[in-house]
Image (spheres, rainbow, N blue to C red):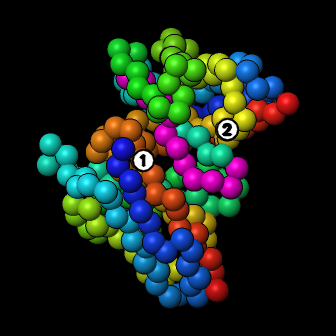
């Protein structure tokens, strides 16, 4: 199975500042169709998860452009510019290039 | 608006069985694969099963293979997860999710399953 390693495990950020989360996969996520199926999923406290970004950098509908995803092959980054209070929660990377789909262990974002 | 509503959870004893349901609306259910994903208390997310849109293929995580069965009834817009030989480590919130290439785009609100004597 592909192992997804996220860092840091937790992050404390002041409102208005930026946050960055790293995700590394144990092998390249570039699929045979040329696409890279790396997703970012957000779970606010007490809520179900919600996808934010798919295929490395494509934002889901309704996701603010303060969120951005970059990366390729095995190294990926989620960046949140101008953090807002509603951004607190846990962020997971998730690979969908190979079965079984696997998740990172999560990064907890706290507001300072 | 896509909606996924799970039900059927509860408290059961080790070794027993339980069947979860997920009713879908807001999209053409019969055209999409569907997943079950679970989250143990205070833990991360674990994908456990996928079923193709027409039930032609089913895939399972090793942790549930042989004990859990995913199925669907397209006439009822409903996804199921039949869970047998339940263990304490199966205690988790169970989510259904709609398939999207490379993952899942919509999740339900989840249903809690607790396995304890």
Which residue is under mark 2?
A: B89
Residue A106 in the image: above or below residue B26: below
Residue B62 in the image: above or below residue B80: below
Q: What segment is highlighted magenta in the picture? A: B41-53
Please tell me whether mark 1 or mark 2 is closer to you in this view: 2
Q: Residue B96 location in percent, x, y?
A: 55, 35
Q: CA distance from mark 1 to mark 2?
A: 18 Å
Q: Quadrant of the C terminus of chain A?
A: bottom right
Q: Dot 2: within a 10 Å radius of its alpha carbon, few (fewer than 14), some, or many (20 or more) residues?
A: few
Using residue A31 as the reference point, say whether residue B36 is left or right of it.
Answer: right
Residues tagged 1 and 2 counted as in contact (Cβ below 8 A)? no
Q: Residue B46 location in percent, x, y?
A: 52, 44
Chain letter for mark 1: A
Q: Residue furthest right?
A: B117
Q: Quadrant of the N terminus of chain A?
A: top left
Using residue A13 as the reference point, say whether residue B8 is left or right of it.
Answer: right
Quadrant of res B15: top right
Which residue is under mark 1?
A: A102
Q: Please give the label number shown on residue A33.
A: none
Residue at horizontal 61%, vertical 66%? A89
């Amino acid at each position: 199975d592909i192992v997804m390693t996220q860092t840091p495990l937790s992050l404390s950020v002041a409102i208005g500042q930026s946050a960055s989360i790293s995700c590394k996969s144990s092998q390249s996520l570039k699929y045979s169709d040329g696409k890279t199926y790396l997703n970012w999923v957000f779970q606010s406290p007490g809520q179900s998860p919600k996808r934010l970004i798919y295929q490395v950098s494509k934002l889901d509908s309704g996701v603010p452009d303060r969120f951005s995803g970059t990366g390729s092959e095995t190294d990926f980054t989620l960046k949140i510019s101008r953090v807002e209070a509603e951004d607190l929660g846990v962020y997971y990377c998730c690979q969908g290039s190979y079965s079984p789909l696997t998740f990172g262990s999560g990064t907890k974002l706290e507001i300072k | 608006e896509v909606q996924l509503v799970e039900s059927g959870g509860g408290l059961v004893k080790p070794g027993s069985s339980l069947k979860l349901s997920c009713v879908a609306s807001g999209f053409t259910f019969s055209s999409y694969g569907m997943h079950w994903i679970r989250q143990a208390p205070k833990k991360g997310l674990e994908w456990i099963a996928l079923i193709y849109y027409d039930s032609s293929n089913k895939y399972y995580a090793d942790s549930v293979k042989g004990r859990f069965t995913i199925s669907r009834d397209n006439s009822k817009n409903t996804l199921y997860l039949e869970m047998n030989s339940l263990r304490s480590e199966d205690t988790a919130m169970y989510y259904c999710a709609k398939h999207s290439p490379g993952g899942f785009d919509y999740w339900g609100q989840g249903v809690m399953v607790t396995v304890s004597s």
